[in-house]
Image: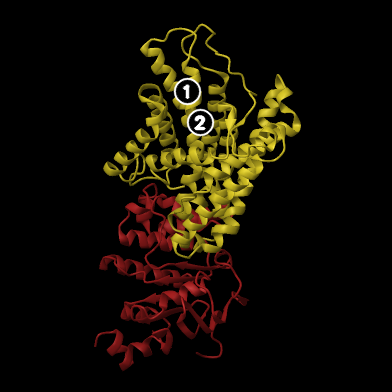
Chain colours: A yellow, B red
Amino acid sequence: MIMSQAVVSESVAPVAMGWGDVLSQQLITGVSNGMIIAMIAIGYTMVYGIIELINFAHGDLCTLGSFLALTMVGALGMEAWAGMGGTAAVVTLLISSAVFCGALNWTIDRVAYRPLRGKPKLALLVSAIGCSFILVNIALFWGGLPMEVFGGGNQAAAPKDFPSLISNENLLGAQSAITVTWRDLFVVIVTVPLMIGLTWLVKSTRLGKAMRAVAQNPIAAALMGIDVNRVIGSTFLIGGALGGFASVIYALYNNTISFQMGYRTGMDAFTAAVLGGIGSLPGAVVGGIVIGLVRALSDGYIEARWTNSVVFGILILTLVFRPSGILGAKLREKV
Amino acid sequence: MSNNSPPVLLSVRGVSAGYGPSDVLHTVSLEVREREIVTLIGANGAGKSTTLMTISRIQKLRAGVIEFAGHNLASTPPDQVVGMGLAQVPEGRRIFPRLTVRENLEMGGFLRHDQAAMNRDLERVYALFPILKERDRQQGGTLSGGEQQMLAIGRALMSEPRMLMMDEPSMGIAPILVVRIFQAIKQLRDEGMTILLVEQNARAALRLADRGYVMETGSITLSGLGRELLDDRRVQEAYLGE
């Protein structure tokens, strides 16, 4: 798995690590990865909350977000940007990818999902799987473009290096056994405000109230004067934009992207959404962090190749004993 | 009705609608005049709810004309029907279970922007159904059936409607609360509201209503003043259990 590469490289610390240091390191890595997973999980859970669709295309949407970012890095020569220019580069990439993924997700809903509303749910699911394949193929085509950042376009399917725009220097000093980098901080600095902002939007704004109403009873929502299709479109827009942010954070954190990134990370995120209680926003965040931690601990203490089995084993056990997920109790807030 | 009767507010003419290949409604026509209570009675599955959903434009219209306050609703989306002043209290109440009572009521005023006027209407709803004020911070889903019905009516009133369509407000509710809800309907009419009431409780509905329509398998088969229909042998045999 791509994510485990980061874990392995960071585990090789300059000083011999005690068990407490190893554990702390896994927890730090786990939380950082977990926050990225959570951002993508929110996109799954929001769409499920409002139209009861597992949007299989969501992970692959994020792949395209990271491909857009890499294209911009190559086209604008952002690798050379340093100092505050580096910050400007990161902000530019985050916002561009968010806008791109939000707009693309909205378009996918408009073209491939909205015409199927009111039809059997299976039709919608098949359409989502189809969109997933189409996006993967677009990513493969994109990765084969003759740009230097894509390796000259010779190996479309190969993982692409994403330049280090954020320092990997240990903030605790080179001699510290535990590594906390700017990247770890960056993940938290970007994701936490976005999650707080989203919670505020859903709880307090007119659009957020409309989203909750549509999720709970779309016909009643229409009878209240809510334009249901528009609210659903906005949900795809917001979920897609968060996925766009996540895709750039992922790329900057891991320094590598590939056409399969969306499938792999998307599977983690989907698992996180189900584990947390699908339809629940706080559930997606909790689920994401839990999955991130489990992955890191499994990578560190068991073996990376067992990690998927561990993650899905926990998911299965959770669903057996608590089918609605960690926070998916009676009082769960959909959307 | 006499010549100086109030103007027609809702006019439904030759409306057909349905799900799948077959029509549920066959050329249905009815009208509601300002400040009238008109009731639509009929057996389960006769098409009463489909009629209301078609008027609210949730259900697709296959043929016919629906006019409200002089506007043709043929190509009006459902969210705009409410804005024109035609609200519906749907069958089964359809309250938002995980919103509080107050939030449910606020959703009813979704299209309004005058906060002061909305607060005034909120107090009016609370005056009409004091239990809602007591429970305003409770989640809608925790209310009893009768309380949920009051909430659904209050929520529709929050849209400042000229006309209210109510679908089976007495269904599945304790008899004491049914009385309370029918009192509220009467009170609303006395305050000038126009009401189209769909009911299975035909006796109570016809007593309350100015006029009534009887619906059978998607067609209107009888119509008349409430009193006339109460005395009609066919209505008595089919719907009043006499």
Secondary structure beneath label 2: helix
- Which of the marked residues, 1 or 2, is nearer the chain's N terminus? 2
Percent coordinates x, y for residue A146 in the rendering: 72, 38
Q: Residue at x 45, y 72 (%)?
A: B189
Up-down: is A240 above or below A25?
Answer: below
Task: Find numbered disc 1 in the image and state the secondary structure of the residue it sits on.
Answer: helix
Report crowding for label 2: few under 14, some 14 to 19, many 20 or more residues within 10 A (C-alpha).
some
Label 1 marks a residue whose chain is: A
Side of B154 where A134 appears, left or right: right
Q: Residue at x 39, y 18 (%)?
A: A23
Coordinates of residue B64 in the picture (x, y in percent): 56, 83
Q: Which mark is residue A7?
A: 1
Task: Name the chain under label 2.
Answer: A
Quadrant of the rendered structure where residue A69 is? top right
Residue lying at 38% horizontally and 61% vertically, measured from the top left = B150
Q: Nearer the viewer, residue B79 or A116?
A: A116
Label placed on residue A2: 2
Position of A8 with respect to B68 (left or right) is left
Label 1 in the same subunit as label 2: yes
The answer to whether one can see residue A263 in this image is yes
